[in-house]
Image (spheres, rainbow, N blue to C red):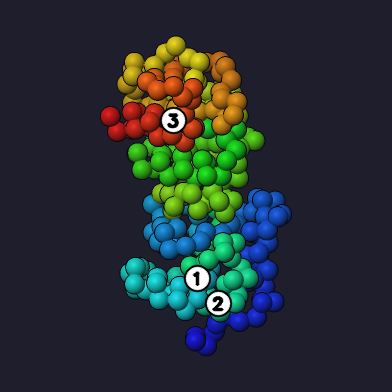
Amino acid sequence: MPNNQITSLQSPHVARVKALLGSRGKKIRASEREFIADGIQSVREVLSPSFDDAPALLHLYVTEKGYTKLQSEIDSAVLDGAPVVHVSDAVMDEMAETESPQGILALCKFTEITLYKVKQRQTKKIAYFWELQDPGNSGTVIRTAEALGFDAVIFSKNSVDVYSPKTVRATVGALWHIPVVENIDVEELIEFASSEGFFTVAFAGDSTGSILELEKSEKTILIFGNEARGLPDIAGVSARVSIPMKGKSESLNVASAAAIAMFEVGIR
């Protein structure tokens, strides 16, 4: 057991982590700009971010078993430079939200990313989500956007908390490789798109246009709607299309629809 291992359940570290994961966690995460990432997959990406404004690692809490796992999968030079805090199994159980924690938790601090910062990055492909509510969907679309070569993901107001534990877990580390902007009204998005020369595409199941007929554009913003209510009419969009389907299903899950659309624009 390391000499500096935390064993007390009354440690300030325990209280801090539990507050970020608890019922008031959203408010605390917003005010402190801190959040928790758990598991080896997320922590691997925490230690190798791809852009300057990616969330920063404050503390990496590990049990003996968790640290051994990290040593087997992460370069020793990277791990040696990380702010590791050793904790007992009991402390990790007290901290962790999941029933079977891997013995690895990262306390991270995020920086607000604005449309101005997106502009500075010479962004060409953006995915925008209007009032997305489900943490799993939200994390999945962030992960998909990063995988398919998009430069940023934007969420409207009244969308899910990007830094909630379930959303962070569903990104599987993509938060450290693609900028995510929150709380952008669709009107502000369209104004930004117009001033920066983006071709904007709204996806709606009732549209007569097809994604297969989209013209290619160097700079594109894809716009997706709420899981239950879809997307309202948006003034000023370049195109409003749907994804053609052969089966009897009336619609696709928003994460599935976004994956198809992002593949069409980002890869094909």
Residue 197 in view: no
**Placement of 220 over or under 90, stated as above or below:** above
Q: Secondary structure at mark 1?
A: loop
Residue type at numbered disc 3: Ala
- The percent position of residue 93, horizontal first and vertical second, equals 59, 71
Total labels: the figure holds 3
Residue, disc 1: 103
Q: Is residue 89 visible?
A: yes
Name the residue carrying label 2.
Answer: 89
Residue 116 in the image: state x and y as whole percent. 51, 36
Residue highlighted by disc 3: 257
Determine the residue located farthest toward the top in the rendered image: 208
Percent x, y for residue 128? Answer: 50, 32
- In the rendered structure, which amino acid carries the disc numbered 2? Asp
Locate the C terminus and report the quarter of the image it occupies.
top left
Vertical side of 3 occupied by 193: above or below: above
Q: Quadrant of residue 243?
A: top left
Where residue 201 appears, as percent x and y from the top left, is 45, 21
